[in-house]
Each structure stands twice: as C-alpha cells, then as structure tokens.
Amino acid sequence: MPTYDYAIIGGGIVGLATAMTLGHREPGARLLVLEKEAHWAAHQTGHNSGVIHSGIYYKPGSLKARLSREGTRSMVEFCAEHGLRHEVCGKVIVATVEHELPGLESLYRRGLENGLNLVRLRPEEVREIEPHVRCLGGIRVPSTGIVSYREVSEKLAALVAAQGGELRLNAAVKIIRPGRHAQVLVTDGGEFEARFLINCAGLHCDRVARLGGVDPGAKIVPFRGEYYELKPERRHLVKALVYPVPNPAFPFLGVHFTRMIDGTVHAGPNAVLSLKREGYTRTDFNLRDFAEVMAFAGFWRLIARHAREGLEEMVRSFSKAAFVRSLRRLIPEVEPDDLVPAHAGVRAQALHKDGKLVDDFLMVQGPNAVHVCNAPSPAATASLEIAKVIVEQVPPRRDLRSAAPAVP
Ligand SMILES: Cc1cc2nc3c(=O)[nH]c(=O)nc-3n(C[C@H](O)[C@H](O)[C@H](O)COP(=O)(O)OP(=O)(O)OC[C@H]3O[C@@H](n4cnc5c(N)ncnc54)[C@H](O)[C@@H]3O)c2cc1C
C-alpha cells in the first residue's frame, strides 16, 4: 500500500487550492488528493453563482471578512496569471422599499469597516449603471467580479499534478483506520496510507471528520439554491450583478441577478432544505441524509427562529410567480415568460445543536489531521486564502516522518 505524507479528501476548490499551496510549501512531499466523483468541482464549487465576492457582508474581524477581501485580490491575480476567464465587473446592492434603507446604510458602514472601496448611489446613479433597476438607493461595490470556479479548479488540479501531486478521481473515502505507518484511507478506488489528512469534503465534511475520530461540534445541513435563467433576448435587462439588501439575520443573500462569465444571466438562488446532501432537484431524497436532519435538534431550533423566512423560501421554490415577484422588486420589467429554470446548487452549512448557524469558516484539528468543517460562501472566492490558513496548521514533512501513527 503506498504511503503518502499528506492526503487531501475532496476535489472541490478548497481541497485543490490546499493541495497546490501545500505542494508549493513542501516540494518533494508525497501528496494525494482523493475525490469521490469522476471530475473536479462536482458539487458546491461547480454549482455556484460564480461571483468573486468582495467581503462587504461579513462581520468585521471574522475569517470570512478577511479571507474574502484578500481572496478577491488573489483570485483575480490567479485568473490573470493563468489566463482564466474572469471580469471585475462590480455589483450594485439596492434598497427597493423604505424599510430597507437602514439595512443598506449598515451594509455600507460594514463594508467600509472591512476596508472596501464603496460608492453610495442615488436611484438615478444606480440607473446609469443598471438602467432597468428601480430602487430608492444603492451601493456600488467595484471590486466584485465573476469567474468560473470549475475552470479555476481544473487549473488548480493541473498545477497540483505538475508539482508531482497524485490526484485520484472515483475514490470516495469510506473508512479511516490506523495503519502500520500512519492512517489508512479505505476508498472505493483502493487503500492509501497517509501521515497527515486534510478533510475538505464539503457537504460530507462532518461525516469524514467523524470517520477520523473528530466531533466537529456541528452538523452539515444542506440548503439547495435554485436558479432561473433569463432568455437570451432579455439578457440586456442586467449589465452585471444586482443584489437586494439581505436580511442580516439570515445567512443567504436573497435572490439576485448574476451575469455569468459565459454571458448568461442567472436569477436566484433561493434557499430551501434539501432532502439529500447532493440533491439538485426537489424530488431528490436520501433516507440517511433526511433522517439525520430530522433527528437533529439544531435544525428544529433553526426552523423555530426562521419560520417566516423558511416558509417564504419554500413558496419561492414551488411557485415561479413568487420567485418572479421577488425579482421584480429589483427589475420590474421582468416577466414570468422571460425566465426558464436553470441549474441548482446545494450549500453545506454547518449548524450548532442550539440552532445557530456556524457563522465563520471553521477548521478543527484532529489526530494528524485538519478538518474543514464549515466553508460556505464566500469560500470559493476565498479558497486561495483559506488554503494558506489550512496549510499553516499542517506540520512540515520532516516532522511527519517521526509522528506516531494516529489512532482515530
Ligand atoms: C448555490 C450556491 C451559490 C454559491 N455562490 C457562490 C459565489 O458566487 N461565490 C463564492 O465565493 N461562493 C459561492 N458559493 C459557495 C462555494 O461554492 C463553496 O463555499 C465552495 O465551493 C466550497 O468548496 P469546497 O471545496 O469546500 O466544497 P465542494 O466544492 O463541495 O467540494 C467538496 C468535494 O469533496 C468531495 N467529497 C465529499 N466526500 C468525500 C469522500 N468521502 N471522499 C472523497 N471525496 C469526497 C465531493 O465530491 C466534493 O467534490 C455558493 C454555493 C452554492 C451552493
């Protein structure tokens, strides 16, 4: 059985960015990436909005605020260096009713505290940027951009391979057990021994942490985000990115318009409980995934706290008319016939037993391991910076050689 110095579980953008960063720090190390699907970025990374988030929304001083601000810069630099399609198009956040104006103002102040360069806009100034938007005021965030995170991930995988890293697709980690030299990863693509593990398993990160003998202190609850797409002849309604003022108590940004890097315009995503961790349609169901959520007290406490918002999201999922109503608050010209159903993504959001969402990125140390236990949006934007934080927690190769085998 081959023995590796480092094994990274998960070939999404966080796992691949970590592999590249670690490979760079430890040239000559035996590094392995294990991904259960047949291609990279198969889940959250390949089903998202493709926005390079500036970091306006996040609590000042949090990892999310710092890493998304730094990640905006490093993601743009990475794309420029490797010739990947991207565009720093900026976005507008707009208040469409009177009672959203204080929220817009606090968002503006929060963005300034987070060190962003922002512009307060009067309604006519918003219309110079987005002629079809009707609002009472807005903020322009010039540093926001768009990209394909799938393309970024493919490039990262190629760079890891070029550094000498080994990448295995179709290798779902099922068991982690102590071995002769280190930990044995039993996968459906063979067995591998690794002295140090990095768990970047996204929607399954809590389960992989438990396989490694670690209680992450939170459970992943999957929230599906569904999108519609504007028909090609109506794409002119949106120049770049148009967002509403989000509900500060809710972790999602509200349905918005996003011009994607391929020129299509997507509207969404909403946020509804998914009955399967990787369930991309309303009928996808997995008994284990569903039963775990239903048996989790934290979920019911969350529901009790956000009953109204949860119900609105459900209605928007089942009723196109309700979805369109939300979008028309931003662009009144949008008609139901302008929109066709598009892709969906499932967010991995960690939830505490007390029903509070894990607000920040969360990494938990285990025996000869680091587990990334919460990496929701803007983790794609921040991936190159999250990777640096993870790698700081990983011992150098010379120390691994003498490390005692881990017993999960
Ligand atoms: C609808 C939606 C919109 C979003 N929009 C944005 C956005 O615009 N900008 C932004 O910055 N972020 C956005 N995000 C968040 C962003 O996509 C995620 O934070 C990011 O992709 C997380 O990357 P990851 O590598 O941790 O997870 P993932 O991309 O989910 O990767 C985890 C990988 O681990 C693999 N895996 C799981 N279990 C195992 C196992 N046992 N063995 C082997 N492999 C395993 C999975 O197959 C998967 O490929 C959005 C997310 C969603 C869902």
Image (spheres, rainbow, N blue to C red):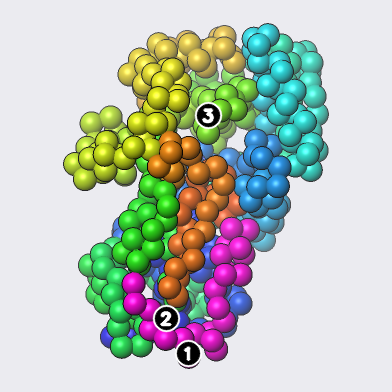
Residue at the image position 54 percent from the left and 36 percent from the top: 260
Distance, label 2 to label 1, CA atoms, is 8 Å
Q: Do the CB atoms of the residues marked 2 and 1 lie less than 8 Å apart?
A: yes
Q: Do the CB atoms of the residues marked 3 and 1 lie less than 8 Å apart?
A: no
Q: Is residue 219 left or right of residue 281?
A: right
Q: Earlier in the sequence, mark 3 or mark 2?
A: 2
Picture quadrant of residue 369: bottom left
Element type at mark 1: loop
Q: Is residue 334 left or right of residue 222?
A: right
Label 2 is placed on what type of residue?
Arg
Label 1 is placed on what type of residue?
Arg
Element type at mark 3: loop
Q: Which mark is residue 401?
A: 1
Q: According to the image, label 3 marks what residue?
A: 250
Q: Is the C-beta of the residue carrying label 3 under 8 Å from the nearest atom of ligand 1?
A: no
Residue in the foreground of this view, choosing between 263 and 365: 365
Residue at the image position 45 percent from the left and 54 percent from the top: 373
Relative image position of residue 20 (x, y in whole percent): 55, 69
Q: Is residue 177 above or below residue 289?
A: below
Residue at the image position 52 percent from the left and 58 percent from the top: 363
Residue in the foreground of this view, choosing between 199 and 135: 199
Note whether residue 224 is visible: no
Q: According to the image, label 2 marks what residue?
A: 195
Label 3 is placed on what type of residue?
Phe
**390 in magenta:** yes
Q: Do the CB atoms of the residues marked 3 and 2 lie less than 8 Å apart?
A: no
Q: Is residue 66 above or below residue 403?
A: above
Relative image position of residue 173 (x, y in whole percent): 30, 65
Task: Please identify the quadrant where the C terminus is shown.
Answer: bottom left
Residue at the image position 65 percent from the left and 35 percent from the top: 57
Distance, label 3 to label 2, CA atoms, is 40 Å
Instruction: Write down the region rendered in magenta.
Output: 385-408
